[in-house]
Amino acid sequence: MSVHVQGSAASAGGIGPGSRVRRAHIGVMTAFIAAGLAFAGLASRIPDVREVLGLTPSGLGLLLLAMSSGAVISLPSSGWLAGRIGAARAVFTGAGLLAVGLVVAGIGTALPAVWLTAGGLFLVGLGTGTWDVAMNLQGAEVERELGRTVMPHYHAWFSLGTVVAAGIGAFADWARVPVVVHLGLTALVTVGAAAAAGRRFLPTQASEPGRAGETRRNPLAAWLEPRTLLVGVVVLAAAFTEGTANDWLSVAITDGYRTESWVGVLGFAAFVSAMTVGRVLGTGWLDRHGRVPVLWAAFALATAGALLVIFGTALGLVAAFVGAVLWGLGASLGFPVGMSAAADDPRHAAARVSVVASIGYLAFLAGPPLLGFLGDHVGVLYALMAVVALTIPALAVVPATRPLPADR
């Protein structure tokens, strides 16, 4: 299965091709920033969720596993869904599921009821997986139409959304705003922004047999391609590096540096701010130096940042915040570059992006219970060493992200 843009200006209501691509460019940016707002709106309240529900680190890990499970379940079919109903409808469908999940999770914290919170997080995961693949597919399509690297910029908009949401979350934590109120408002913003984004997307449809230049094949064939699987491993390492900080950095700083929870959330805000900067600057680095050397440098920087956060307690909070910034810069490019690499060939982009995203999201499936288990035994701060254990061997598979020969 492949996704392609419908042809003429007439098919887009008389808008010229350049205008259509510019509109879609803005739409993709809007989708990414909305996804960032929704994600960090939840992530910024994780310390409060832990406190309200009275969870141990392993208990929190199992709760977060509900969200990861929903995402992993939805990802294998999300590329197919986007090809069937279009990226715009797939994004809106994912946003709707995510919004309902946020409301349910918020109610779960208000009761409090762990099982209801877990159910809400499962719906959040389902929606996130559907939304993520659809907007990355549309982003890759626009990137090809523009003829230049823009995928990291889209992920920078996601990171900008997380920065804004983390700041709001830190204030909400400090002001004691109930989690249910915060997540309910986040849900409303999410649905509205997703609807606005989708109206600007390039129209897409499933490929038809016999169309010139198109090859119809079983989308499961992508699971047998060595390059696709290796790109998936790169994204797995990147997702674990990013996702561990998203889920645990605020808790690790709060516990490990013996500070207030809102200070830990500000550490998380420093991380996502650095990711935003890395993704904005990363497009130039990638065009100038290529994917492989940039990703090697990024993984090394993330490793150094994580080590500084873990072992910087003697230096105080300055070390935690500097480490969070280095970690964020290093974690900024792995996921977007992996998505671009999976979509190098537009004929099979939908299937390959779905495979790579599915492999990457295994990090979100395994990460929460792994970090929670380690946190019970060595503390959440030292449990972050799991990031270092994965980023170093990931350097060996980075060359798989080199562009395909036909796309050089």
Image (cartoon, rainbow, N blue to C red):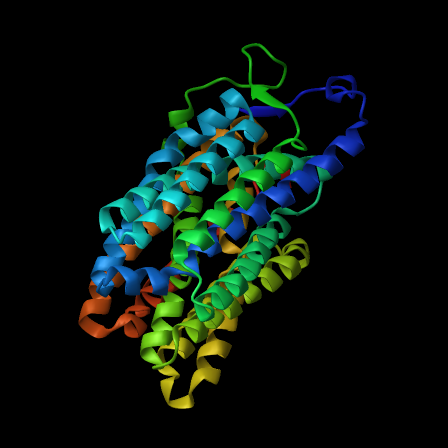
To which quarter of the image does residue 278 belong? bottom right
Q: Is residue 391 above or below residue 399?
A: below
> Percent position (x, y) of residue 152?
60, 51
Q: Is residue 41 above or below residue 86?
A: below
Q: Is residue 293 above or below residue 114?
A: below
Furthest-bottom residue in this view: 314
| Residue 24 in view | yes
> Percent position (x, y) of residue 220?
38, 26
Q: Residue at position x 47%, y 55% from top?
A: 41
Left or right of residue 381: residue 88: right
How many badges with numbers are in the image? 0
| Residue 68 in view | no
> Percent position (x, y) of residue 253?
38, 75
Q: Nearer the viewer, residue 92 or 316?
A: 92
Left or right of residue 57: residue 155: right
Left or right of residue 407: residue 106: left
Q: Residue at position x 29%, y 65% from top?
A: 51
> Percent position (x, y) of residue 300?
47, 68
Q: Residue at position x 79%, y 33% from top?
A: 19
Q: Residue at position x 64%, y 45% from top?
A: 29
Q: Nearer the viewer, residue 158 or 47?
A: 47
Furthest-left residue in this view: 377
Q: Nearer the viewer, residue 181 or 151?
A: 181
Left or right of residue 151: residue 25: right
Q: Nearer the viewer, residue 178 or 161?
A: 178
Image quarter (top left, top right, bottom left or bottom right) of the C terminus: top right
